[in-house]
Amino acid sequence: MSKRAESELKLELVNVGHGDALVIQWIPKNGEPSTILIDGGPSAGAASVKATLAKLGVSELDLAVLSHCDADHVDGLLGYVKDKDALPIRRYWGPCIPAFRRHQWLFAPRVFGGIAKAQELQDLLPRTCAVSWPVEGATWTSSDNGLSIKVISPAARLIERLLVADDSTSLFLEQPMPIGWLLADIQEDDDDDDLLSGLRLAIATGEITADVIPPRPPIPGPPSQEDMKREAVAKGVDPEFFGNSVLNDTSIVLLVEARIGLVTRRIFLTGDLENFTYLMARYPMGLGCDIVKVPHHGSRSYVDRDIAYDAVWQWMRPRAALVSANGKHNLPRSEFRDAALRYGTTLFCTSRRQREIVSGQMNETCCHRQFGCRSEANVALSVTASGIEADQTACARGNLTGVMPVIEVRQHVVDPSPILSTMAETEIRKHTDWAVTWLRGILTERQERPSDAELPPVSLDILKQAAVGAGRVGASVEIETILERAARSGRIWMPPRRHRGDERSVWVMPQAKEIANFKAWIDDFAVIQLAIQDRHVASAPEELLYSADTGWIATRFSERFSYPKEMFKPAIWPIIAAHLLKTRTLAVRSMPTYPSTEASTIMVLFRETSLEAAHEALVARLEALPDFKEIRDYIDTLERKFRIGWPAPAFPLVLSQIIAPLWLKRELLPSGIVDRSDFPTFPLVGTYPGVEQVRNWIHSSFYGRPEPFEDHLVRSFVASFILSGYEVIRIPKPDR
């Protein structure tokens, strides 16, 4: 096994005229080299490919790729494979031929000829060659794992639609092929049959093979080629190229990553891709590539249906770009060249300039004609950890366009692309949808476990790890930005960071059905008691509710619904408080000012419109309880508290099911038994027989042993000391 000072990546763009043929050679620090051939150019390119491989001393091809079925990519590769001296090929990636054969009538004869040649090429490959049709997600890795090649287009859903759907004809009726529908959420097909299961499993792995293609009838065509030509003219497409856009925008697009020492170099190989909508949405921050093989020989680039040179080159922003064209079809376009240079790219071309324009008109649409270029030689790049070197002079260096003066100093400001912003928004929305779904799954799992009111929200660190585990590395890097956006839209709760370095946390916001459950839960309380500590904090009803201590309610809520208690006061209580203001009467009482008083203001909320009506309704609820022994014991303990100083008893559990106790960091005694230490100064609520006996019991408890009262007064007594001493300040308005 050979050992070298450092790994190296070599790229050789073969001079095939108008067409593409590229050789990648990976020379690892340890191990044997790997060689990849991508496309073969037109027919004449076969000899150039053979000569290039011989010059590099290659003995076999580890991977051969046909990016798509255009003649200027497939003819040379077919010619090379037919050559008796062709090197053995271990693995082959090619376009999904059955997807195109199914739509045969929609292709002009010239275009479909390329599909037939791709089939012939595939049939010539030996049985020892592993053949597949890749979609996004397919990968190839060198034996030393230092070089990886990942397919990032075509989209799996696009190829599946061409293979099996009945509505795929519409993809041929626009140029470029429409891609935006791929950004919509996936709609599950309820009518999926078992025949598709094998195909979808293969698509999930990224590589389709012939044995998983389900039988589907071809798309019916018009009665004659003349009808097809009329269709092409109606769509503004040259009949000779009708259907070619579908081939271009299903190109196998590759992202090559070479790990060289501590550096990773990226090469972006675009085939003849024209419509970048899907890729820019999938990778909104760009690919961070060092080198790009120029898409479609320097032709137009689109986002949706708009020509978007600047948006695409701003998104790619490579250090170097390789273009193979010779002026045929007016390519490369001058607009492409200028856009690439505006974004700092150094251009290398298999053609060479024969003219330098010092001053004068720059009005040719094709830069090949503008500079009198002629086809000359291969372009070879050597990529190492320290940089990128070429074996020839660049056509032009970045940030200079048009005529190059002898000396020039230029400041070039590029506005952010609104198209890129739209793509980024789409990707953020997808990440947000994933995060909300993941958090809702955690909520469901917590609800299936025993209740724990102290469970915290999820930390951003955990969510980052979950994003990586879900294959969303981009989301993990930008998770805080994504979640802040989601929080502003009301889908999640994420409190602001209080101190620098604090770890932030997040939780999902409730949906409408859950909010209805929250309201039903709070509605089950006949009376809600609340306390406020600072007497100057609020006076208006809504202010009072927001200022109250909700600690007891928050704990019960978290136990019931598994939402973090930390989230209750800022995010859940405002929802519940707004509901209470619409449905409950609010009564308040100011407490004495001497130091022993903990609360400055206490309040109660009930459904009825007066304290007297609330008293009657509460007694009725208490009478429905099966046993009042626990309540009687509570009253007896209260008497001992006042008489001999026992600790205040805990609010009975049976009562806490229908009455929220008064709470201020700890449980307080209800209004009717908390007052001046000498004597209560307010009348007890209620007109029941025996109310004076209850009043005397409270008075006597402060000074000595009171006379006990009958059991039939227990429920009335409880309702009295819960509701006494208040003044009604707000009655809900009836619904209109």
Image: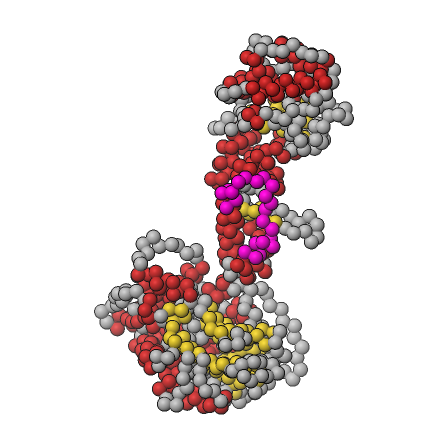
Image check: 724 left or right of 284? right
Image check: 700 left or right of 137? right
Q: Pick the residue in front: 170 or 692.
A: 692
Instruction: Indicate the quadrant containing the N terminus: top left, top right, bottom left or bottom right.
Output: bottom right
Can you name the residue that lies furthest to the right here?
Answer: 595
The relative height of residue 414 versus residue 610 in the rendered view (above or below) is below
Q: Pick the residue in front: 192 or 317.
A: 192
Residue 435: x and y in percent read 52, 53
Q: Is residue 582 magenta?
A: no
Residue 31: x and y in percent read 53, 81
Q: What residue is drawn where x is 45% and y is 87%?
A: 59
Image check: 348 left or right of 156? right
Residue 32: x and y in percent read 51, 82
Residue 458: x and y in percent read 58, 49
Q: What residue is drawn where x is 53% and y is 40%?
A: 450
Q: Pick the residue in front: 123 or 309.
A: 123
Q: Is residue 448 magenta?
A: yes
Query: Is residue 394 in sight in this rendering?
Result: no
Q: What residue is drawn where x is 40% and y is 69%?
A: 207
Span of residues in magenta: 445-466
The relative height of residue 605 versus residue 130 in the rendered view (above or below) is above
Q: Pick the residue in front: 636 or 303.
A: 636
